[in-house]
Image (cartoon, rainbow, N blue to C red):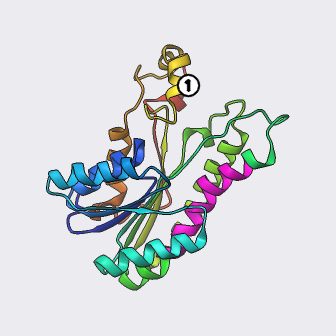
Amino acid sequence: MTVKDRVALVTGGSRGIGRGVVEALARGGAKVAFVYNSNSAAADEVVSALAAEGHEAWAIQADVRSKEAADNVIEQVVEKWERLDILVNNAGIIRDGLLATMDAQQWQDVIDTNLTSVFNFCQAVTRQMMGQRYGRIINMSSVAADVSNPGQANYAASKGGVEGFTRCIATELARRGITANAVAPGFIETDMTSAVVSAAGAEIKKKIPARRLGLPDDIAGAVMYFAADESSYVTGQVLKVDGGLTLGGL
């Protein structure tokens, strides 16, 4: 899969799945900018580690919930590298709570971070990609869009929205050489899932046919497929990377 000499931007790229994606793109030969929220030490560590391997990465602090911030980030990347070929909308949070007790802020924080940010960055990059007549947009969904878990109404709504949004923009942008696809991870070992895994990891694995939790590299591989030149005829798709979790069965 070819991403050599492409320019990529990843939101939420300083840890977990996002870091895995940044590393995969950089090692594949792309120049990679990534957005982080507040942990500058973690962001700097990603840049330094990749630089030590001879790869180019650039960390940009921004609030992905802000349309103005998204516009500014895209502008910075294009100004630095003169184009932007690959956008990976990975930033996301969880704020679980049962419907009866979920407060409005829990709802809005998740919707703004997981869904509105996708709109912000996709809209901001569209004109640039249309002018290039080339682009790869990859949005991070979740199996939570299909598999219901109590206490995740906000998260499930945000990820279901991501999938519908991705299919819609795929139809709008296809004639300009731009694809839009989504990756839907299952249970992946990251900081965000550590509490759940530590409490119920053994039970979770029993429900997964592969009998293991996923790793950030598993998701990065799927992103690399959608990001590559060779995937030009694939758009509007959602790829579940879940070890078979959503297949059902015993």
Query: At 54% from the left edge and 26% from the top edge, which residue is drawn?
Result: 195
Query: At 52% from the left edge and 70% from the top edge, which residue is drawn?
Result: 70
Q: Where is residue 238 in the image (x, y as percent from the top left)?
A: 50, 50
For residue 16, say whether it is visible.
Answer: yes
Q: Does 94 lie within the magenta span?
A: no
Left or right? Give the position of 111 relative to 13. Answer: right
Relative to 246, is 155 above or below? below
Question: In the orientation shown, which residue stands out farthest toward the front?
Answer: 41
Pointer 1 local density, CA inside 10 Å: few below 14, some 14–19, many at least 20: few
Left or right? Give the position of 116 relative to 153. Answer: left
Position of the C terminus by quadrant: top right
- Where does the magenta region start and end? 107-125
Q: Which of 2 and 29 is in front in this view?
A: 29
Position of the N terminus by quadrant: bottom left
Q: Position of residue 240 (x, y in %)?
A: 47, 41
Left or right? Give the position of 83 relative to 3. Answer: right
